[in-house]
Image (cartoon, rainbow, N blue to C red):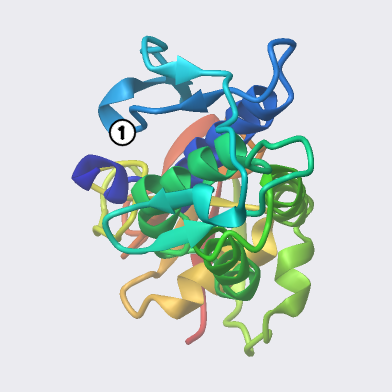
Amino acid sequence: MIQLLQTSWEDRFRICLSLVRLLHYLAHSPLGSVTLLDFRPRQFVIVDGELKVTDLDDASVEESSCTSNSDCFMEFPARNFTLPCSVEGRCQSMNEKRNLYNAYRFFFTYLLPHSAPSSLRPLLDKIVNATGELHWGIDETAAQLERVLNLYKSGEYLQNTTRVPKAEYRRVPEAFIPDENYRCWPSYHHKGCLLSVFDVNEAIEICDSYSQCKAFVLTNQTTWTGRQLVFFKMASNHIVPDPDKITYVKVTD
């Protein structure tokens, strides 16, 4: 979990999104609603950035039987829940809700809000709070996370941010700055500041927000959401030709 917290928010969001998609499938599986009775991080692996469950020994499709609501008691270390008992004598959505609360306490609370884009924080906090209180089922949780994905991929989340006056930048096509790195966190590169951006305007805003940033380089690499990876630099003294990159140099502060 410590290693995951050191990765970018975009990668941590992908883990949570893949987990919710998995839990949505388990809630609507051909076998019925499947619960993971031994739900812990060690039961999962990350494959190509997405979470996969590896241990199904303790999976169950049996919804607990009941005669009253008091029979539908779910106990967790931090808090407890009582779910309604249906007329058929089964605890309503207990398998789904058990999975969802475990996802909240082991993953969402650590990975979702931390260093997220500021304009997405209210929605992410709402998702974390709603799952932590079990106000939502898996269908609503999945729909809200897909909404976050759409806002992030489309760049709509940038429309909710306050645009500050920008410095001027000079565009240098087919150019790269090999050195002049500084570290930022979280970064896709451990020795430099490599971040993903929706467009050049977002790259300019990021550079303006770092006092040491004097230039940035657009690469031809993208993340899983299609966002462009950008190197942020603290100087532009040594620019070299590179047909796959575009450099922007700050000319005024």
Residue 183, percent across and down? 24, 58
The amino acid type, in three-letter code, at marker 1 is Arg
Q: Is residue 118 above or below residue 238?
A: below
Name the residue beneath numbered marker 1. 40
Q: Secondary structure at mark 1?
A: loop
Q: Residue at x 65, y 63 (%)?
A: 135
Give the residue displayed 74% in from the left and 44% down from the top: 86
Work out whether residue 178 or residue 116 is closer to the camera in this orientation and state it. Answer: 116
Q: Residue at x 36, y 52 (%)?
A: 75
Residue nearest the viewer, comparing 143 with 157: 143
Q: Is residue 242 above or below residue 147?
A: above
Given the current orientation, which residue lies at the most extreme front position?
67
Q: Position of residue 23 (x, y in %)?
A: 60, 31
- Is 175 displayed left or right of 185 in the figure? right
Q: Does the image show residue 40?
A: yes
For the N terminus, the quadrant is top left
Q: Is residue 97 above or below residue 253?
A: above
Q: Is residue 186 left or right of residue 182?
A: right
Give the class, few, some or many, for how many residues have Cα within 10 Å of label 1's Cα (few <14, many ≥20): some
- Residue 176 in sight in this render: no
- Residue 56, picture quadrant: top left
On screen, residue 206 above or below 196: below
Residue 50 in the image, given as x and y percentages of width and height:
49, 26
Q: Where residue 195 sits: x, y (%)?
A: 45, 51
Point 30% across, 62% down: residue:
78
Between 107 and 88, the residue placed more toward the observer is: 88
